[in-house]
Image (cartoon, grey):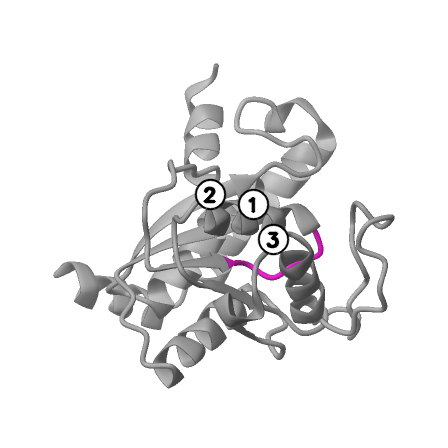
Amino acid sequence: MNNIIKDIGDFIFIENKPENADAIMVVGGSFPELSEIAADLWKNNYAPYIFIGGGVSVKTGIFPGPRTKQEIYNKDYITEYDFYKDVLLMNGVPESAIVGENRSSFTRENALFAKNVADEKKMNLKKVLLICKAFHARRCLMFYQSAFPNVEFLVIPFEVYDLTKSNWFQSEYGIKRVLGELKRCGDQFTADDIKNYSNSFGV
């Protein structure tokens, strides 16, 4: 494999093995599998709480509905939060274990508003399992690590659109998606993010 292709894949696609943690955080979206993964981790005692978040799309102003499994999750969901919560409840997670917000519209807000919730509830988080789409992993980690500079994040990805680290460059769609993420990682990473990282890691 060409080195530059491998380097891009290694940068964008991140995957860690789950470990016992203080919380599970699900990045906003419309794939029920993300919340299903969170429910499985919770039921296997990896963490006591699941953070969910998300309002409506910043592009359309609405929640578009589930991308998959519409036959199972078929209610009229107003926000991503409503959708994710229903998935969790239907998969055996009690409401007492679910925390979150329904206002965020994009990834950075998912992270920042999760931090607000954690602060409001005085949750002392040290390690978090972060569940997101596989090709979205680097940008999610960037924003969540910036919002929670003292937390260790382990990324638990879910592959969507058949895009993986080993095949993304084999289709025009995959190239567009992954290089788009690469561009956003540069465009959306700010001086404040760099400052947060620097203060956290003593750089």
132 displayed left or right of 87: left
What is the residue that sits farthest to the bottom in this orientation? 120
What is the residue that sits farthest to the top in this orientation? 1
Residue 27 belongs to magenta span: yes
- The CA span between labels 2 and 1 is 9 Å
Q: Is residue 7 above or below residue 45?
A: above
The one of 184 and 119 positioned closer to us in this rendering: 119
Mark drawn on residue 35: 3
- Contact between marks 2 and 1 (CB within 8 A): the answer is yes
Q: Amino acid at mark 2?
A: Ile
Q: Which residues are magenta?
A: 26-31
Q: Residue at x 38, y 81 (%)?
A: 121
Mark drawn on residue 37: 1
Q: Residue at x 69, y 50 (%)?
A: 31
Q: Is residue 182 above or below residue 54?
A: above
Residue 156 on image: x %, y %: 46, 43
Q: Earlier in the sequence, mark 2 or mark 3?
A: 3
Residue 178 on image: x %, y %: 59, 40
Q: Amino acid at mark 3?
A: Ser
